[in-house]
Amino acid sequence: MPSNRWVDRSQPQTLMMATVVMYINAVLGIGAFLVSLPLAFFLVICPVAAGWGIANEKKWGYWLGLAINVLAVIYLLIHPGFGSVISLLFYIALVALLLHPESRSYRRTWFR
């Protein structure tokens, strides 16, 4: 298996889509660098790292992706704001993709 890939097309569709959506969320969160560095870390760097980890079949990538998306759902439920409904739907979809039985089965079998 070649290492350092950004998207692994041989993974189940649920994991591949979760990886792509994490990258899209990171691109949309780039403006957070203007607001604060910790927020930028949470919205940009962590999703890119998690997506890369998932694409390269790393357990830490899966768990990082699941953790940041669950935290985002909790945060958006506690602090609703303008546009948070759409963001909340994206984060809930990501959690659902990562917790899908096909994703979990693939992770248990192939991730190191």
Image: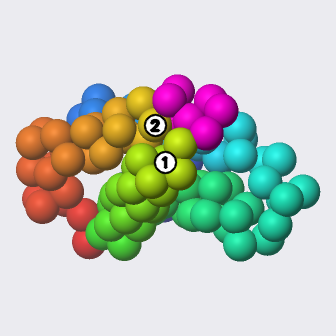
Name which residue lies at 31% across and 45% down: 95
108 to the left or right of 37: left
Disc 1 secondary structure class: helix
Q: Point out the residue furthest to the right here.
A: 34
The 10 Å Cα crowd at callout 1, few under 14, some 14 to 19, many 20 or more, is some
Residue 9: tell me if it is visible. Answer: no
Which of the numbered marks, if any, corresponds to residue 88? Answer: 2
Q: Earlier in the sequence, mark 2 or mark 1?
A: 1
Highlighted magenta segment, given as a residue range: 81-87
Q: Is residue 85 magenta?
A: yes
89 to the left or right of 46: left
Disc 2 and disc 1 in contact, CB within 8 angstroms: yes
Q: Name the kind of residue labelled 1 in the image.
A: Leu
Name which residue lies at 78% across and 48% down: 30
Disc 2 secondary structure class: helix
63 to the left or right of 106: right
